[in-house]
Image (spheres, rainbow, N blue to C red):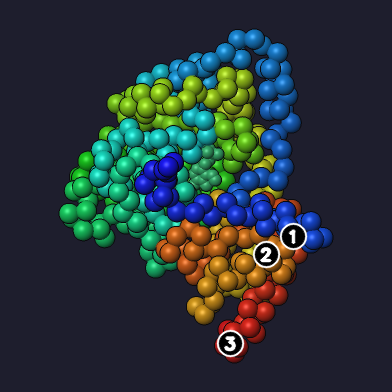
């Protein structure tokens, strides 16, 4: 009899797993489906970037194994970018590591820093690599709900002392997916202080650091004094350059932690494709001009979605960062009921908060992955869905 591991049995369902099948069925039935589910850009990477890759494909050396050392040019461009962007210097060879997208490094990190049974603080709702990496790494998740009353921040000081003593790793992500929350500096100082006090590794997921609006500039955790003792910061080229499918990211921080992650990865992968590292280096060196139009377009979409949501009767704040609207629902309406109705009856894919775990209940997520007119159309349909759910349940209040 074939058996599947207990670890796999413990993995929660992936929130996006069932959507492609349902979408195919609806499209086959003639429905006009608007997909605002995954945080996956609708447009291509900048044309110059694609051209650099096209040329790189003609270089034989770039088709070889990269191993963990990867391409020196990528390592050097990555630390140059960190220095330009955040004013922090890292050694390109001992304090940074190329990743096959940041998801891969985030999830493998548990194997590098935790023993079986160690505790890992996992925000909920949160990016699935955190809980997945924790379970697959045989550690124990400590789920911390991200709630509006705490500005969607992971407050370690609210956890019991005994829990903090057994915690080896905490995942934190600001600008945040899915809540779009940002982290104030005094919060980051509290976080670093707690991690230092309890010897907790701080995995700071900065995948959305470039996607910010209204003049807000997202910080690096390394701008906080003392962070270098405990933190690793994860960066992604997926959102900044619309290179989601390319799988290029990197991590920077303390050399012992980088070296441990490097060691794990040397047994499970052989690094990102060198032609992509070559191209990623070029993109990082041109980040300022490449990222700007992408953020300008996302800001337009954000404004369109927020205005449309308010017009449809949703109460929602305008996010200062990331590419999502995290929209509260009325108390009487479970998020999965709403999003299932919106998908099946109105052809709009949005994610229920509960799909990110019970801590996400009461909200749904819209990804800004369609042009403004399509987003407005989607929100009109969401407004109809809300009215229909209200009628079905016979609710007379707002
Ligand atoms: C919070 C967060 N971290 C990391 C990632 C993964 O990015 P990458 O494509 O670099 O693996 C995502 C992707 O959606 C994300 O939302």
26 sits to left or right of 112: right
Image quarter of residue 114: top left
Task: In the displayed orientation, state which residue is furthest to the front.
Answer: 1
Residue 26 image label: 1
Residue nearer the viewer, 324 or 342: 342
**Callout 2 touching callout 3 (CB < 8 Å):** no
**Callout 1 touching callout 2 (CB < 8 Å):** yes
Residue 220 image label: none
In the image, residue 249 sits, relative to residue 334, either above or below, namely: above
Instruction: Give the residue at x 69% y 66%.
Output: 344
Which residue does the numbered mark 2 point to in the structure image?
Answer: 343
Question: What is the x, y in percent for residue 182?
Answer: 46, 53
**Callout 1 touching callout 3 (CB < 8 Å):** no
Q: CA separation, marks 1 and 3?
A: 29 Å
Q: Quadrant of the C terminus?
A: bottom right
Crowding at mark 3 (Cα within 10 Å: few <14, some 14-19, many 20+): few
Which residue does the numbered mark 3 point to in the structure image?
Answer: 395
Question: What is the x, y in percent for residue 191?
Answer: 31, 49
Instruction: Indicate which disc, 1 or 3, sits on the residue closer to the N terminus.
Output: 1
Question: What is the x, y in percent for residue 123?
Answer: 39, 54
Residue nearer the viewer, 216 or 164: 164
Q: Quadrant of the N terminus?
A: top left
Q: CA separation, marks 2 and 3?
A: 21 Å
Instruction: Identify the element where label 3 is drawn.
Output: loop
Crowding at mark 2 (Cα within 10 Å: few <14, some 14-19, many 20+): many
Instruction: Identify the element where label 2 is drawn.
Output: helix
Q: CA separation, marks 1 and 2?
A: 9 Å
Instruction: Give the residue at x 25% y 44%.
Output: 118
Question: What is the x, y in percent for residue 33?
Answer: 74, 59
**In the image, which is nearer the foreground, mark 1 or mark 3?**
1
Instruction: Give the residue at x 57% y 22%.
Output: 273
Image quarter of residue 368: bottom right
């Amino acid at each position: 009899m074939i058996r599947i591991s207990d670890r796999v049995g413990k993995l929660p369902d992936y929130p996006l797993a069932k959507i492609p099948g349902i979408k195919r069925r609806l499209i086959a039935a003639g429905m006009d489906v608007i997909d605002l589910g995954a945080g996956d850009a609708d447009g291509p990477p900048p044309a110059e970037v694609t051209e650099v890759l096209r040329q790189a494909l003609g270089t034989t050396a770039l088709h070889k194994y990269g191993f963990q050392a990867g391409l020196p040019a990528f390592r050097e461009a990555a630390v140059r970018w960190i220095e330009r962007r955040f004013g922090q210097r890292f050694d390109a060879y001992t304090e940074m590591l190329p990743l096959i997208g940041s998801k891969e490094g985030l999830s493998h990190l548990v194997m590098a820093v935790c023993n079986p049974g160690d505790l890992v603080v996992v925000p909920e709702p949160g990016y699935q690599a955190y809980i997945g990496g924790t379970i697959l790494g045989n550690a124990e998740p400590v789920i911390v709900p991200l709630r509006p009353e705490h500005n969607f921040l992971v407050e370690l000081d609210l956890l019991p002392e005994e829990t903090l003593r057994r915690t080896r790793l905490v995942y934190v992500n600001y600008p945040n997916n899915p809540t779009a929350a940002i982290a104030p500096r005094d919060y980051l100082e509290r976080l670093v202080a707690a991690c230092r006090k309890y010897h907790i590794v701080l995995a700071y997921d900065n995948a959305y650091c470039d996607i910010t609006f209204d003049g807000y500039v997202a910080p690096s955790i390394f701008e906080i004094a003392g962070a270098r003792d405990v933190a690793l910061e994860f960066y992604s080229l997926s959102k900044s350059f619309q290179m989601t499918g390319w799988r290029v990211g990197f991590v920077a921080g303390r050399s012992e932690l980088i070296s441990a992650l490097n060691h794990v990865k040397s047994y499970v992968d052989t690094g990102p494709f060198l032609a992509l590292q070559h191209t990623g280096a070029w993109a990082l060196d041109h980040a300022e001009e490449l990222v700007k139009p992408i953020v300008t377009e996302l800001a337009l979409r954000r404004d369109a979605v927020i205005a449309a949501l308010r017009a449809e009767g949703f109460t929602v704040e305008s996010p200062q960062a990331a590419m999502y609207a995290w929209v509260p629902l009325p108390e009487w309406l479970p998020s999965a009921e709403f999003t299932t109705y919106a998908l099946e009856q109105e052809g709009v894919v949005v994610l229920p908060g509960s799909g990110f775990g019970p801590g996400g209940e009461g909200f749904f997520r819209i990804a800004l992955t369609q042009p403004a007119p399509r987003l407005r159309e989607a929100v009109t349909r969401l407004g109809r869905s809300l009215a229909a759910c209200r009628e079905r349940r016979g609710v007379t209040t707002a």
